[in-house]
Image (spheres, grey):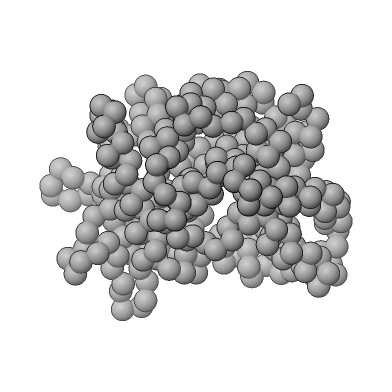
Amino acid sequence: MLHSGHIHDTYFVETDAPARYVLQRVNHRVFKQPEVVMDNIRQATEHQLRYFAANGLDTKVPESVAVRAGGYLHQDASGNFWRIFTYIPDTVSVEKAETPEQAFEAARMFGRFSAALRDLPASRLPETIPGFHDAVRRRSAFADAVANGLPERRAAAPEVAFFTARSPIADRLAGLLARGEVPLRIVHNDTKISNVLLDAATGRGVCAIDLDTVMPGTLLYDFGDMMRTFLSPASEDETDLSQVRIRMDVFEALAKGYWAAFIDGGAGKGNAGVLGKNCPKRVVSLESRMKDDTDCTDRFLGKQPRHCYSNASVPSVLSAIQDNLPF
C-alpha cells in the first residue's frame, strides 16, 4: 500500500507482464460522484495528451485503465469504488519542497498542465466537490460555525478574528469572476508538491498527477495553493508556529516555473488575489475546529483532528507574513 495522500487508499500493483499499475479505492464520502470524477480525469488526460503530441513533447501521464464491464470504475459488493491507472516508472513524489530547484520543477509541471488545458471549455467539466473554492459560501458556513460552535473551541478566537478581517476578499474574487476580469478555466485545484512526479535520477518534472479536483476555477487557485503549501519549510500540521516562515527563494522559483510554462496563455500576475485565495481552504479547517471532529475526520480519511486544528493556524501565520510582502 502506498501511504501518501489523505483521501484514497492507494496500492502499487505488479503483474507477470512488464506493466505496473496504481490501484485506488475511491473515498466516496469526499467524492460523492465517482463517475463524474473519472469522466473529468479522462477528458483532462486526453486533452493533455493531444497537447503534448501537437507540441512535440514526449511526455507521459498516468492513464485510466478500463475495467472489463466497461467504463473506468469497478464497484464491489460493499459499495466501494475502485479504479486503476498506469504507473510511470523511474519517478518519485515528495512531501515537501526541499530546494528552490525542486519547487521550480513542480511549478513548471502545474503551469504546463494549465497550458495544456487552456482551450478546454470550463463548461465541459462539472465540479467534483461543489463549492470547493467558493469563498462566499465558505464565509457563510464559517460564520454559522462561529455562531453555533462548541464553547470549548472558542480558544480559536485569534484565528476567527484573522479570517473575519479578511472576509472582503471573498466578495472581491467573486466580483472579478462575475465580471470576467478573472477568466474561469479548467485548473488542477490541488497543487501541492506531492501531486507532481519528478524524474528519480535528474529531479526534473515529469507530470502533474491526482486529477480528482480538476474542474472549473482560476489560475489564482492553483498558484495560490502552491504558495500555501510550498513557501514554508514547516508542515501544515506543525504546532510550533515559530517554525513557520516564508522562503522568498522558493516563491521566486514558483513564479518563474509556473508562468514560464504558461506564458503563452497571456496570464496576468494578480498577486493580491493569489495571496487572498488561500482563505477558503483555511476557513474549512477552522470551521471544522469550531464545530466537532466528525467533519474533519471524514474529509481526511480518519486522520487525527489535530490535522485540522493546526491546518488553520499555520496558514494564518503565513498569510499574516504575506500581508507585509512588497507586492
Along the line of sight, which residue is nearer the eye, 65 or 305?
65
Q: Residue at x 52, y 42 (%)?
A: 191
x and y percent of residue 63 in the render?
28, 48
Residue 150 placed where, x, y %?
Answer: 80, 70
Residue 17 picture location, percent across and down: 13, 47
> In which quadrant will I find the C terminus?
top right
Q: Residue at x 15, y 43 (%)?
A: 18
| Residue 267: percent from left, percent from top | 54, 32
Instruction: Say above or below: 280 vs 68.
Output: above
Instruction: Give the camera-side residue of 73 and 9.
Output: 73
Relative to 57, is 222 above or below? below
**Residue 119 sits above or below residue 299 on the image:** above
Residue at position x 30%, y 65% in the image = 73
Residue 294 in which image quadrant = bottom right
Q: Residue furthest left?
A: 17
Residue at the farthest bottom position: 77
Task: Answer with left or right where residue 64 lies relative to residue 300.
Answer: left
